[in-house]
Amino acid sequence: MANQVAEGFILLSANNLKGFAPGDLNLLRTELDKLQREARSEVPPADDALANQGRNRRIARLQSAMQVVSHKLTARS
């Protein structure tokens, strides 16, 4: 699921995460963090604007998904 979020096929919201247990949410957050580190480590050529945009979009999608998951975890406590 984390990979689908990174590629933009799924946009996470609180409604998408209703059936997830806290352990599942922690695992999803870990996978999202791992993918975000991988995306940040990729450095496209400076003159390739489309590659830079794609990288930035992927990082932004992962960051927003991590915020949704973190909010869901704190709201359950």
Image: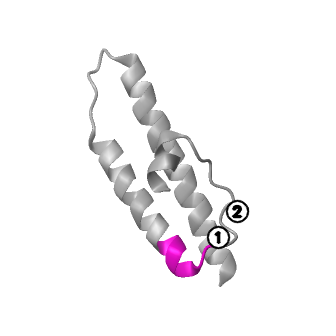
Magenta stretch: residue 21 in it?
yes
Coloring basis for residues: one colour
Badge number at residue 14: 2
Q: Position of residue 66 (x, y in %)?
A: 52, 59
Per the rendered image, the range of residues in magenta is 20-26
Residue at 44% x, 35% y is 56
- For the residues marked 2 and 1, what is the alpha-carbon distance in whole angstroms? 7 Å
Q: In the figure, 40 relative to 25: above or below?
A: above
- In this picture, is 46 found above or below 30? above
Name the side, left or right, on which 16 lies relative to 60.
right
Which residue is at the front of the view, 6 or 52?
A: 6
Q: Quadrant of residue 74?
A: bottom right
Under mark 1, the amino acid is Lys
Image-based side of 62 in relation to 14, left or right: left
Kindly give the residue lying farthest to the right in the view shown: 15
The verdict on residue 54 being magenta is no
Q: Position of residue 65 (x, y in %)?
A: 56, 54
x and y percentages locating residue 51 in the rendered image = 37, 24
Q: Element type at marker 1?
A: helix
- What residue would you read off at disc 1? 72
Q: Which mark identifies residue 46?
A: none
Main SS category, magenta section = helix
Tell me: 50 left or right of 1.
left
* Chain-order first, disc 2 or disc 1: 2
Pick the quarter of the image with the C terminus.
Answer: bottom right
Q: Residue at x 35, y 43 (%)?
A: 39
Residue beneath the point at 35% across and 58% down = 34
